[in-house]
Image: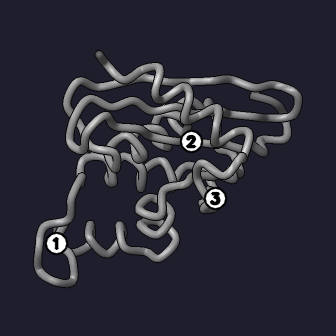
Amino acid sequence: MNQNNKVKIFTDGACSGNPGPGGWGAILRCGDKEVELSGGEAATTNNRMELTAAIEALARLTRPCTVTLQTDSRYVVDGIEKGWAKNWRRNNWTKSDKKPALNPDLWEKLLNLCEIHEVTFTWIKGHAGHAENERCDQLAREKIPR
């Protein structure tokens, strides 16, 4: 996006029913440039949409970047920041309670992108007036298939 390679990403996922049709939204900001991304799926879960938003945003970057990614998903933040996803992958997508980890396909993609970029995941409270989170929620909801 620009020379300094410092990017702020904001993401959100939404579902109408869980599982059900869902959507995701993301904002990428680098310097004075901003890009909005969004998409949807007919049959999904909220957690899959939260992961997809982060994946699609990071995949849009054209070179390694230092990224701050803000999301209202504890699932995404804790999965990366607490090392859960790396442990699940190391244990053939099995959690510590011996149950299968959910969404291994998406966690694999996200972990691979985090190896390209230096990403810090930050949790923000959803539906609390955070402008970018509200916009990402709107983008996600607009893409939920009807």
Q: Residue furthest top?
A: 146
Q: Amino acid at mark 2?
A: Thr
Residue 56, placed above or below residue 54: above
> Does the residue at mark 2 contact the one at mark 3 (Cβ under 8 Å)?
no
Q: Amino acid at mark 1?
A: Thr
- Mark 1 Cα-neighbour bin, 10 Å: few <14, some 14–19, many ≥20: some
Give the residue at x 55% y 39%.
58
Residue, disc 3: 124
Q: For residue 61, what is the image quadrant?
A: top right
Residue holding disc 1:
94
Picture residue at 40% right of the left edge, 46% below the top: 51
Q: Is residue 127 above or below residue 62?
A: below
- The alpha-carbon separation of the residues under discs 2 and 3 comes to 10 Å
Instruction: Between residue 96 and residue 73, name the one nearer to us.
Output: 73
* The residue positioned farthest toward the left in the image shown: 99
Quadrant location of the C terminus in the rendered image: top left
- Say which of 19 and 107 sits in front: 19
Quadrant of image for the N terminus: top right
Residue 108 x, y percent position in the rendering? 32, 52
Display coloring: one colour
Secondary structure, mark 3, is loop
The residue mark sitting in front, 2 or 3, is 3
Going from the N terminus, do you reach mark 2 or mark 1 first? Answer: 2
Please give the name of the residue rendered at 74% of the width and 39% of the height, measured from the top-left corner. 131
**Tags 2 and 1 in contact by the CB under 8 Å rule?**
no
Q: Residue 83: horizontal and vertical position, in percent?
A: 43, 74
Q: Is residue 64 left or right of residue 76?
A: right
